[in-house]
Amino acid sequence: MSEKIPKGWKWVKLGELLNSGLFELLDRYRIPLSDNQRNKMKDGILYPYYGANGIIDYVNRYIFDGEFILVAEDGTVSTDKGKPVVQYVCGKFWVSNHAHVIKCENSITLKFLYYALKNVDIIPYITGAVQPKLNQRNLLDIEILYALDINEQKAIAEVLSSIDDKIDLLHRQNKTLEEMAMTLFRQWFIEPTKDGLPEGWEEVELSKLGQIICGKTPSKNKPEYFGGKIPFIKIPDMHGNVFVFKTEDSLSEIGAKTQKNKTLPERSICVSCIATVGLVSMNAFISQTNQQINSIIPYKEFYHYFLYLKMKSMKEELIAMASGGTATLNLNTTEFSKIKIEIPKEDYLHAFHEKIKYIFEKIFINTIQIQTLEKLRDTLLPKLMSGEVRVKF
């Protein structure tokens, strides 16, 4: 805790803010849903079902309606910097008992509190060796530096929110762009094959279209193999990403050279094939992956986006292939390589690539902008929330 306190600020525990009526803790309203209570039907109105670190499902009912802060109760869910997973949630939703629910009548204070919590080191407040947990008592013991003037709270929240709003807009644009690409893919490759293969089309094994690489983890007994500049992609890095720019782990040059045959050129197609099956991403930079991922290095440039969209369209089929009667899904490299792919003549594939490539270039550029904005926000956050940088109000 810094001894320098900006004028008009004070250190305060969340429990003090709760007792003063500045916010409510609504944990008592949380009701976990069992699998058989969840409605996964595509028709009707469905609402997000939040867990400790994001949406885990969509259901046909909701508990909360409005603006809230969710703080991860599950102590295993934290960032590599030791900060809590804090979500600002709007609208109608359900929440599991793995996240604390905070509500403020004053939306300005709610937003300020959200950013204050994102700036807290959560690790000292987590207890439990077997099941680490941020329990309610420890949550209320969290101490934050609190700006007393509501106008200063508003000014700080507006600066950070403006960045987050731009990031959210770019994420939504990318989602729309990917949906557009998938719509075009279905028009070009799914609809024409409903009644059999058109003239000139053929069915080939996936290995005929690209080199198949199963990733590998270098020896953990060699710390010098890790911590370099070469991205090491694992399944959590793939969630929600068309292009993987950031990875939790990385390899050194030495570590990567021990398994040169596992190196992927940019924009290879990475497909998760163990445990969580059917995630598909492309690596933004030269990378390697762990053994849970099979990757395709396309033999021709105009195969890239076709293969990415083809793998995305096959998620249910990939899961079925990986089931094999075992508890853990596992689609091995041999079976993955033998997947049958329906393809037209090359001029058709080339024409599709030319039509679709601008969509993926826009997604790529948007993702670079997201990285830049996130870096700016993460730089400003501790400075604004400590009073080191003051804003006019």
Image: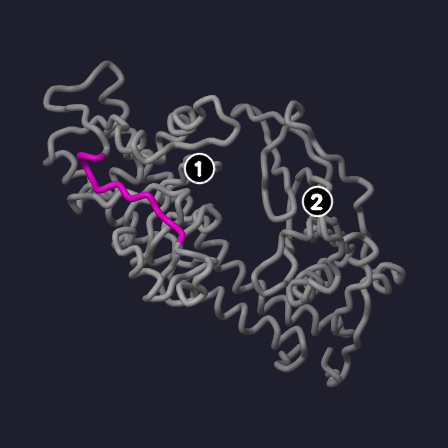
Q: Position of residue 336 (x, y in %)?
A: 31, 32
In terms of sequence position, does the residue under pointer 2 or pointer 1 come before the other?
A: 2
- Residue at coordinates 33% horizontally, 33% vertically from top-left? 183
Secondary element at image label 2: loop
Q: For the residue marked with disc 2, what is the amino acid?
A: His
Residue closer to the observer: 391 or 115: 115
The quadrant the C terminus occupies is bottom right
- Residue at coordinates 10% horizontally, 23% vertically from top-left? 200
Quarter of the image for residue 247 reads bottom left
Q: Residue furthest front?
A: 221
Quarter of the image for residue 146 reads bottom right
C-alpha span from label 2 to label 1: 25 Å
Q: Position of residue 94 (x, y in %)?
A: 68, 38
Q: Which residue is mark 2?
A: 98
Give neighbour class at mark 1: few <14, some 14-19, many 20+ (Cα, 10 Å): many
Secondary element at image label 1: loop
Residue 328 among magenta residues: no
Residue 214 among magenta residues: yes
Q: Which residues fall within the magenta stretch? A: 207-217
Q: Which residue is mark 1?
A: 274
